[in-house]
Image (cartoon, rainbow, N blue to C red):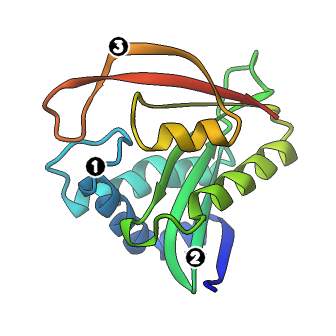
Amino acid sequence: MPRLEIALFDVAQTEAWQPELAELLHACVHDGASIHFVQPFPIEQASAFWRDKTLPGVAGGRRALLVAFLDGELAGSVQLDCDTPPNQPHRAEVCKLMVHPHHRRRGVARALMAELEAQARMRGRDLLTLDTASGDKAEPLYRSLGYQAAGVIPGYALDGRGEKRQATVLMYKPL
């Protein structure tokens, strides 16, 4: 049985693992993941995401980066964004859940989400929100984890190829 471990990355770990994190993001986008990027998507753009978007949030304590390792190999990640307005100190957003295409269907996403919820509770957050492409393979996963749809916004974002607009489901889960 594969050994699955979840780690909460600090700034040094995020910097040290940036090449592998970039490869994870790159592979997921090229496999069709609906995580806010469109193709063509060069590896340099994936690296820039971790350096310019994720790292400052981790450094400032506003973002928790959870990384999954399967038998020692980086298999997935998810982020908990706690950078909410003053009237929402109880809420956080689930961002960029991704599992490398080679490691899917092994419980990685569920393990990441379980730890994300534990991290949210430790930070005093009792309401999680997220958005996902309507009909995407992630939607049933979120529903099975207890997330409820708040609504659907038609034409919210371009698909992964940048060819057409797709609807997005806004979801939430009270903890």
Label whose residue precedes the other's in the sequence (1 or 3): 1
Marks 2 and 3, how far apart at CA = 36 Å
Secondary structure found at label 3: strand
Q: Earlier in the sequence, mark 2 or mark 3?
A: 2
Q: Residues within 10 Å of mark 1 (few under 14, many from 20)?
A: some
In-front residue for pair 111/68: 111
Q: Quadrant of the N terminus?
A: bottom right
Q: Residues within 10 Å of mark 2 (few under 14, many from 20)?
A: some
Q: Which residue was labeled with disc 3?
A: 154
Amino acid under label 2?
Phe
Left or right relative to 54: residue 7: right
- Where is mark 1, residue-wise? 32
Whole-number angstrom distance, CA of label 1 to CA of label 3: 19 Å
- Measure the C-alpha gap from mark 1 to mark 2: 22 Å
Identity of the residue drawn at 66% across and 26% down:
172
Identify the residue at image location x=84%, y=43%: 121
- Looking at the rendered structure, the kind of residue marked 1 is Gly
Where residue 141 appears, as percent x and y from the top left, is: 56, 44
- The image quadrant where one finds the C terminus is top right
Does 152 appear above or below 38? Answer: above
State the SS at label 1.
loop
